Structure formats: structure tokens, C-alpha cells
Amino acid sequence: MSITKEMPRAHWGLVAFCFGVFALLSAAILTSGLMTPEPEMSIGTTIGEIAMDIRNAATGNATKAMTPQDTFDTTWFLMFVTPILAALAAVIGGISLFRHEPAALSKMGIAMGIGAFVMQYAFWLALLICGTVLLISIVSNMGGIFGE
């Protein structure tokens, strides 16, 4: 017979930890660009096409129509799965703490879920800032790009 009280197993904490690991892994894959396809054009060609699209839209003679993508894009999938997994990790970790299970796994699950959400948010915020700077520089140098 033992004097120490047996602690319950952290079932919910383990599930929260697993969801947190998967959320952090999907955020890291999304941030690294590991699943994105190789670009068909160089960056200079892409910037030139963006500038041409801006110029055509400003003058009113848009020639190309938007075509829908036929392939499955893993970037969009990861973009939606990451916050869902992160939220599940945080909620299930909270359930584990509410049920008074051992706190180590549930706290790690909550931390990983929040970390994955912040990682994805910071990544998209950085892309938004860089894209805005790029578009501002394209518009301000429109005359130099087309030799006018």
C-alpha cells in the first residue's frame, strides 16, 4: 500500500499536446514554404507583370481574365488548418486544466497552440507589410519601369 495519492492520467492534456504539436508543425511548414510549388517565372518578370496589370487597370484596358486554379493548393489548406489545430490545442488544454489533470502536458499544448497562432499571424503580417512596400515602390517607379 502506498501513502502517496495516485494522480490521474492526463488524457485531455495528451490530446492538447498532440494538437499543439501538429499546429506548430503545420505553421512551420507554411512559414518555410516547403509545400509551395516552384515559381514558373522569375521575380523580375512577376514584378513587371504586376506593374503592367496596374497600368492596364489604370488605363482601363484589362486584357487577361482571371482563371480559376485546377490543382489542390496545400498552402491554402495549411492556412486554414493551422488556426483550427491551434484553437483545438488551447481549448482542450483548458479542459484538461479544468479537470485537474497533471498540468505539464496541458500547459505545453496551450503554449504550442498559442505559439502556432502567433507564428502564422506574424508571418502573414510580415508578408502584408512587404507586399505593401513592394506595391508602393512599383507605383512610384511606374514611369521608370516602362521607360516613360
Image (spheres, rainbow, N blue to C red):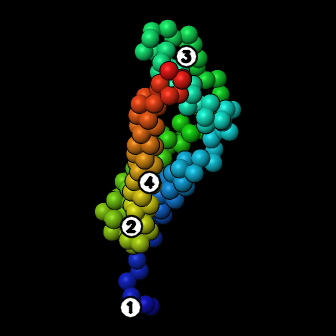
For the residues bearing labels 4 and 1, Cβ distance under 8 angstroms: no
Mark 3 / mark 1, whichever is N-terminal: 1
- Could you classify mark 3 by the number of other residues whose Cα lies within 10 Å: few (under 14), some (14-19), or many (20 or more)? few
Mark 2 / mark 3, whichever is N-terminal: 3
- Return the x and y of residue 45 as percentages of the image width and height: 62, 30
Q: Secondary structure at mark 3?
A: loop
Q: Name the kind of residue labelled 2 in the image.
A: Lys
- For label 2, the residue is 107
- For label 1, the residue is 3
In this rendering, does residue 88 appear at all?
A: no
- Return the x and y of residue 92 as percentages of the image width and height: 39, 56
- For label 3, the residue is 66
Examine the rendered structure and indicate whether residue 104 appears above or below residue 37: below
Q: Secondary structure at mark 4?
A: helix
In this rendering, does residue 104 appear at all?
A: yes
Disc 2 or disc 3, which is closer to the eye? 3
Q: Which residue: 41% across, 72% down? A: 104
For the residues bearing labels 4 and 3, Cβ distance under 8 angstroms: no
Q: Which mark is residue 53?
A: none
- For label 4, the residue is 119
Q: Name the kind of residue labelled 3 in the image.
A: Met
